[in-house]
Image: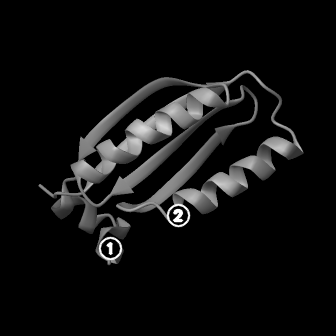
Amino acid sequence: MSTMKIWDLHMTYDGPMNEEFFQDTNRLAESIAQETGVIWKIWTLDESTGDFGSTYLFRDLAALETYKAMHVQRLEAIGVTIASDHVFDIMEDLSAITHAPLGETV
């Protein structure tokens, strides 16, 4: 097993997903890109329901836990509700076979 961790979460937002929302998430993405221990984040959205989610790759569990504590508060402050979240270990051998971008961690 790897020391890297995946954090997968699914969220809901009751506000409008308008231009202002997407400008705010763009600024949020720029902030997340600077966070210590975050290797990458994939953003997901189901426009038909307004449900959205994120899958992150973290350098290690300590970085994930530090980031998660801050980020959950930040999400709650803007009206985002976390419907579910899970932390996963990475099975590197199998992931390498299926071309997971794990080797791109500097």
Q: 80 and 84: which one is in front?
A: 80
> Could you say which quadrant of the image residue 95 lies in?
bottom left
Furthest residue toward right: 19
Badge 2 amino acid: Ala
Q: Which residue is mark 2?
A: 33
Is 104 rendered above or below residue 78?
below
Is 73 rendered above or below residue 58?
above
Badge 1 amino acid: Thr
Is 16 rendered above or below residue 44?
above
The residue sitting at 23% across, 48% down in the picture is 61
> Could you say which quadrant of the image residue 51 lies in?
top right
The residue sitting at 86% across, 39% down in the picture is 18
Tell me if 60 is positioned left or right of 105 in this view.
Answer: left
Q: Secondary structure at mark 1?
A: loop
Tell me if 74 is positioned left or right of 70 in this view.
Answer: right
Furthest residue toward left: 1
Label 1, residues with CA under 10 Å away: few <14, some 14-19, many ≥20: few
Q: Which residue is mark 1?
A: 105
